[in-house]
Image (cartoon, rainbow, N blue to C red):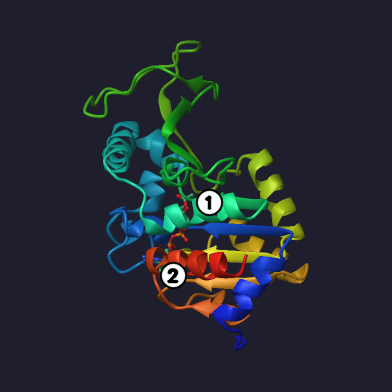
């Protein structure tokens, strides 16, 4: 890890042509949405193979659907936090600023961010398990019966990426392009353990980006960061915005 400072970061942001951020579950933690790999995270309590894989859905679709509908309720009742709002503010200050997220909760968009690249899909969207067609019917999250596809009568599933599935091709391609041309790249609230998203900070750094990690804990990425901000995103990001505003 290098010994760059917040001042260095602000200077880099001031001069940057292109800035990208990769966010993960930690960014939504302060909105009351659980992360995955923290000690109280979802994967400490639930089995991802059972709940977030094709095999899991095929063997017990009702269980998977109910688990996701519960998460949809949580997301629908949550609001963006100061970290989401600060990123939206940064996007309005910096001309070429991309938000790449692994989150499926839509909170960046609720905070006003635009053109968000959703690598792992969206929990409030659905599609047919059989034919893949998008499902636009109303969803009653308390209804245990899984809706059926209007075209082929297949079961409807959440439009998220499950373990073993490919990421949406456009999203990952765009994310890689943004990472390659970034002058500053942020990895925020992610354990940086799930690929291919976890490649993005390395792609950025290999192409010359100043790499910043915002995470109260250390991750496998920390030692590669030019600047490690060991704080929560809702604390750290508004400070960065304020400091940047002083110099532009
Ligand atoms: P993880 O749960 O793996 O990591 C969350 C990270 O957020 C951890 O490194 C925490 O230290 C950090 N963190 C916790 N609270 C924070 C806060 N307030 N501010 C900043 N950081 C905080 O979540 P992801 O890295 O997003 O994929 O997980 C990646 C993917 O694995 C998810 O998209 C999901 C999961 O399985 C799929 O479901 C396909």
Q: Residue furthest left?
A: 142
Residue 215 position within the rendered picture, expressed as x and y whole percent measured from the top left: 45, 71
State yes or no: discs 2 and 1 in contact (Cβ < 8 Å). no
Identify the residue at image location x=44%, y=16%.
149
Task: Judge by depth and name the residue closer to the eye, 22 or 57.
Answer: 22
What residue is pinned by disc 1?
101
Quarter of the rendered image showing ligand 1: bottom left
Crowding near pointer 2: few (<14 within 10 Å), some, many (20+)?
A: some
Q: Is mark 2 within 8 Å of ligand 1?
A: yes
- Point out residue 59 in the picture as x, y percentages from the top left corner: 37, 36
Image: 121 above or below 194: above
Give the number of the mark in front: 2 or 1.
2
Residue at 23% in and 26% down: 144
Task: Judge from the rendering whether residue 160 lies leftward or rightward of residue 75; answer left or right.
Answer: right
Question: Which element carries disc 1, helix, strand or loop?
Answer: strand
- Looking at the image, is 123 positioned above or below residue 24? above
Which mark is first along the chain, 1 or 2?
1
Front-most of residues 166 and 229: 229
**Residue drawn 55% across and 69% down?**
246
Q: Give the secondary structure at mark 2.
A: helix
- Residue located farthest toward the top when viewing the structure as drawn: 151
Splitting the image into 4 quarters, where does residue 74 fall? Answer: top left
Crowd class of label 1 (few under 14; some 14 to 19; many from 20; radius 10 Å): many
Which residue is label 2 attached to?
236
């Amino acid at each position: 890890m290098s010994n760059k400072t917040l001042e260095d970061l602000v200077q880099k942001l001031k001069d940057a042509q292109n800035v990208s951020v990769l966010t993960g579950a930690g960014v939504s933690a302060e909105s009351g949405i659980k992360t995955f790999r923290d000690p109280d995270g979802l994967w400490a309590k639930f089995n991802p193979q059972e709940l977030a894989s094709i095999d899991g859905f095929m063997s017990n679709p009702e269980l998977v659907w109910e688990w996701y509908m519960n998460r949809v309720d949580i997301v629908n009742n949550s609001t963006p936090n100061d970290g989401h709002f600060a990123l939206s503010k940064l996007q309005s200050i910096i001309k070429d600023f991309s938000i790449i997220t692994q989150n499926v909760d839509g909170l960046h968009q609720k905070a006003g961010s635009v053109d968000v690249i959703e690598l792992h899909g969206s929990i409030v969207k659905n599609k047919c398990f059989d034919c893949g067609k998008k499902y636009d019917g109303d969803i009653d999250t308390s209804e245990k019966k899984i809706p059926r596809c209007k075209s082929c009568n297949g079961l409807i599933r959440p439009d998220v990426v499950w373990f073993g599935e490919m990421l949406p091709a456009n999203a990952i391609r765009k994310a890689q392009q943004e990472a390659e041309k970034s002058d500053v790249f942020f990895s925020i609230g992610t354990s940086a353990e799930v690929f291919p998203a976890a490649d993005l900070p390395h792609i950025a750094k290999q192409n010359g980006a100043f790499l910043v990690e915002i995470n109260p804990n250390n991750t496998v990425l920390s030692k590669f960061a030019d600047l490690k901000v060991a704080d929560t995103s809702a604390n750290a990001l508004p400070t960065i915005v304020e400091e940047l505003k002083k110099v532009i």
